[in-house]
Image: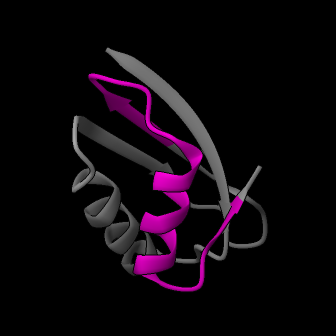
Amino acid sequence: MSEQQWSATGLTCDHCSNSVTKNISALAGVSSVTINVKPDQASQIITVADREISADEIFGALRASGNYVLVR
C-alpha cells in the first residue's frame, strides 16, 4: 500500500471535500481518501492506494471536482 500526501487550495467546506473525495476515490487502486479542509490555506489530502498515484491524476480529479488547485 502506498500512502501519499497532497495539498490543494480552494476547498472551503464539506461539499468541496465530498466532491474531491468522490473523484479521487474513483482513481484506479485508491482505497481511501482523507481530507483536512482548511478554508484559508492549502488543505491536506491523504490517499491510500495499491500503487503510486501521479500528480497528474490528482490534478485531474481536483479539476473535475471544481476550481481546486494542486499545490506542487
Q: How many marks?
A: 0
- Name the quadrant of the N terminus: top left
Q: Which residues are magenta?
A: 46-70
Q: Magenta includes 43?
A: no
Q: Residue at x 44, y 37 (%)?
A: 53
Left or right, 49 with respect to 20, comes to left
Left or right, 66 with respect to 2, comes to right
Residue 47, image x, y percentages = 41, 37
Q: Residue at x 27, y 51 (%)?
A: 27
Residue 42, image x, y percentages = 73, 59
Above/below status of 71 relative to 30: below
Left or right, 41 with respect to 32, comes to right
Residue 59, image x, y percentages = 55, 62
Quadrant in the rendering for residue 49? top left
Q: Magenta includes 53?
A: yes
How does the figure colour the protein chain or chains?
one colour
Q: Residue at x 34, y 44 (%)?
A: 33
Front residue of this view, candidates 53 and 11: 53
Name the residue furthest bottom. 67
Front residue of this view, candidates 29 and 17: 29
Q: Residue at x 34, y 56 (%)?
A: 24
Left or right, 69 with respect to 37, comes to right
Above/below status of 58 relative to 53: below
